[in-house]
Every structure is written in structure tokens, then in C-alpha cells.
Amino acid sequence: MKDQYWMTQALALAEKAALESEIPVGAIVVLNDEVIGEGFNAPISLSDPTAHAEIQAIRMACKNMNNYRLPGATLYVTLEPCSMCAGAIIHSRIDRVVYAATEPKSGVVESQGQFFDAPFLNHKVTVSSGVLAETASAQLTHFFQYRREQKKKLKEQAKKAI
């Protein structure tokens, strides 16, 4: 039940990303039942390819804890982490990752590999997946449908202008 509560918070952050025309992914870092970091996708608005929701949340959590390591923390994210974010999770020593929807193209927790199970890693992460997956998937689907409709309208307007 706690996982659903925190994932709901991450989904609200994902909605903020969508409102800024960013892919709707939200993340929060929780330690001792308290949010210590949060973030949403912002690579376009920040002109920063590393500004994924997970990275934003980890940065805030580390700053708030005055430590680059977050032992005992759980990261909640609405979409399966990519390789960059998985690496940041390992380096920050987050204990647990809970994500909603899978990312078939670039997710590395289960879709394109099992990164956290790699034998060379010096830290182990516990993973739970599928928490509010339908809600997160619907949020992403709606965003991309809207984006396609907008592109179609722009093309039609361009044709009329010619």
C-alpha cells in the first residue's frame, strides 16, 4: 500500500513534466517515510540530456542529505530506468527501486537487460515493478497521442500556408 501511495506522488510529478511538454516521467526518493528528493523529466527545458526524473530526484536527495550516497532510500519512478539512471542508482547506493511501467526500448531493469543483476556491480538493488503500471502507461500513451495530434495539425497548417 505504501508503494502505491508514493507512486501516486511520482505520477503527479510526471504530470508536471507533461505540462512542460516533456515526456511524463516523475520520480521521488523516500527515506524513513519522508520524501528527500523529487524530480520530473526536464532534458528539453533544461537543455540537459541527463535531466531525467530519476537524476533530478537523486540530485535533490543528495543535496538535502548532504551526502552523495543514499543508503536505506527507495526511488519511486513512473517508468523503468534507462542505463544512465540505473548507473546513478548504483552510485548513489539507493537500496530499492520501485517503478510503474516498463520501457521496452531503453529500460535496463527487465526490458533490455537486467542491469541490477550484473555480477560486476559493488551494490545490490532490490526492485519492485508494475506498481500503478496501467496508470503510468495511460499517462504516457495520452501524452504521445497528444503530441502526434499536434504535429499533424502543424503539418496541415504548413500545407495551407503554401
Image (spheres, grey):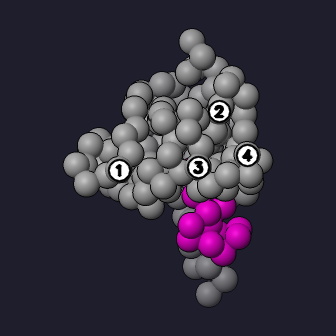
Structural crowding at the residue carrying mark 3, measured as other residues with C-alpha within 10 Å and reported as few (<14), some (14–19) or many (≥20)? some
Q: Residue beneath label 3, please?
A: 69
Q: Which residue is mark 4?
A: 65
Please rate how many residues cluster around mark 2, counting C-alpha atoms within 10 Å: few if below 14, some from 14 to 19, many from 20.
many
Question: Is 154 inside the magenta-drawn segment?
Answer: no
Image point (56%, 33%), residue name: 72
Q: Are marks 2 and 4 in contact (CB under 8 Å)?
A: no
Q: CA distance from mark 1 to mark 2?
A: 22 Å
Of 36 and 103, nearer the camera is 36
Q: Nearer the viewer, residue 79 or 21?
A: 79
Q: Residue at x 62, y 72 (%)?
A: 48
Q: Secondary structure at mark 4?
A: helix
Q: Look at mark 2 in the image and give the residue it sits on.
A: 30
Q: Which residues are magenta?
A: 40-54
Say which of 110 and 143 sits in front: 110
Q: Is residue 153 visible?
A: no
Q: CA distance from mark 1 to mark 4?
A: 22 Å
Tell me the mark number nearer the camera, choosing from 2 and 4: 4
Query: Which residue position is annotated with label 1?
Result: 122
Instruction: Examine the rendered structure and indicate whether residue 77 appears above or below residue 51.
Output: above
Which secondary structure lies at badge 2? strand
Amino acid under label 3?
A: Arg
Residue at 59% over, 29% down: 7
Query: Mark 3 or mark 1, which has the lower sequence index?
Result: 3
Question: What amino acid is at disc 1?
Answer: Asn
Residue 156, how many percent across, how many down?
58, 70
Q: Considering only order in the chain, which callout, 2 or 3, is on the residue closer to the N terminus?
A: 2
> The residue under label 4 is which amino acid type?
Met
